Amino acid sequence: MQSTVEFTNNESLDSLCGKRIILGVTGGIAAYKAAYIASALTQRGADVHVVLTEHGAMFVGPATFWGITRNPVITGMFDQPPDGEIKHISLSESADLLLIAPATANVIGKLANGIADDMLTTMALAVRCPIIIAPAMNANMYSNPAVVTNIDRLRQRGCIIVDPEEGRLACGAEGRGRLADPDKILRVVEEVLLGITRDYAGRTVVVTAGPTQEPIDPVRFISNRSSGKMGYAIAECAARRGAKVVLISGPTDLETPSGVEIVRVRTASDMFEAVDKAIADADVLICAAAPADFVPAEASSEKIKKSDSLTLKLDKAVDILAEVGKRKGRTVLVGFAAETSDLEKNAAEKLVSKNLDLIVANDVSQGNEVFGSDTNEVTLISRTGDKIRWPRMSKREVANGILNYVKEHFLEGRS
């Protein structure tokens, strides 16, 4: 079996367009990471307004944040506003979220005790939106009883704390106090603003995606038009909802979703071996890949020379769904059916013959944009008898819909 396993942290948040976020940046060495956070939020469409404390500006200047967000950076409490608005009132009333990253022990203490002596702490008292706080400081400071009490007090008031991580600190010591990974902070922002719940926490979801490539010779192969986008969307959504996700992917050009373990394979045989290994620990297996149905009976070890014609003998490839259906045990098995005619009839027959719990059927006949598209129009057919037709929607919406159905009909009440 030729496969590789990778872990990546590439992030691909859903659009935050229309969301106004106040980003508070305080005086710690981790302030430079706030520039990445501001950039990531801005690229995802958020309207980001940076409030930079006096000490924060000693680490990263206002010009950096202005260049990233294209919004004026708020620094002094009594700066003359360019538009005549009282910023701590106007922004606090319109903000969807206040994010403070990094948050020093000093600012955490002020927030916990209702002190408002600069623009950031004043805004924190005025906002009525959710507040996310990402502490960063020396390990001894973080474990100090006063800081522990202040953080607990903020939690009790409804603030969301993104706990710091262990590692080497700026002072050279090792311990807990490093700012949480910015991508983790971004995921928490998404969960809060987009209402994503972590209802798959403690579950293992295995997803297959993409085509396979069956070699004819060292430079040629048989494949299909699958882009892998549907499977990658399912893996991404499952990870965001708290699942441990293993994505078994044929060759694609897609970035690996954040927090997902990826196993890269090339042939249908490779994919089957990877699936067979992963299913033992899987609560859910969603087979969104399009592995080859037929493979060359014999692949040439040397490039076949160009000729007027070439005859290929094809053998039947391993039927991954059928084989897994025989041994799935308690694993919830979801398959896909790409059909060009008799969509529901053919999908329903496949549901039974492969011993699936749920099948997702889509019409791939000429004129229907499926391969390579960011949208899909599907029908869900369940062994419980349900038949649900969905209108065309984004593949992420389809992915979350599948996960919702699986959770409600097959996982509820299961330990």
Image (spheres, rainbow, N blue to C red):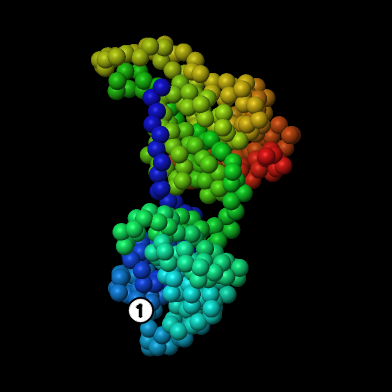
Nearer-the-camera pick, 59 or 193 = 59
Q: Residue at x 53, y 49 (%)?
A: 240
Counting from the top left corner in percent of width and height, residue 197 is at 60, 53
Counting from the top left corner in percent of width and height, residue 340 is at 56, 30
Q: Is residue 395 visible?
A: no
Nearer-the-camera pick, 76 or 89 = 76
Q: Residue at x 41, y 22 (%)?
A: 1
Q: Is residue 190 above or below residue 342?
A: below
Q: Is residue 101 above or below residue 218?
A: below
Counting from the top left corner in percent of width and height, residue 379 is at 64, 38
Task: Name the residue beneath numbered marker 1.
Answer: 54
Q: Is residue 281 above or below residue 243?
A: above
Left or right: residue 266 compared with residue 156: left
**Circle 1: element type:** loop
Q: Residues within 10 Å of mark 1 (few under 14, many from 20)?
A: some
Counting from the top left corner in percent of width and height, residue 129 is at 56, 71
Give the amino acid type for the residue marked by disc 1 in the picture: Glu
Q: Is residue 257 visible?
A: yes
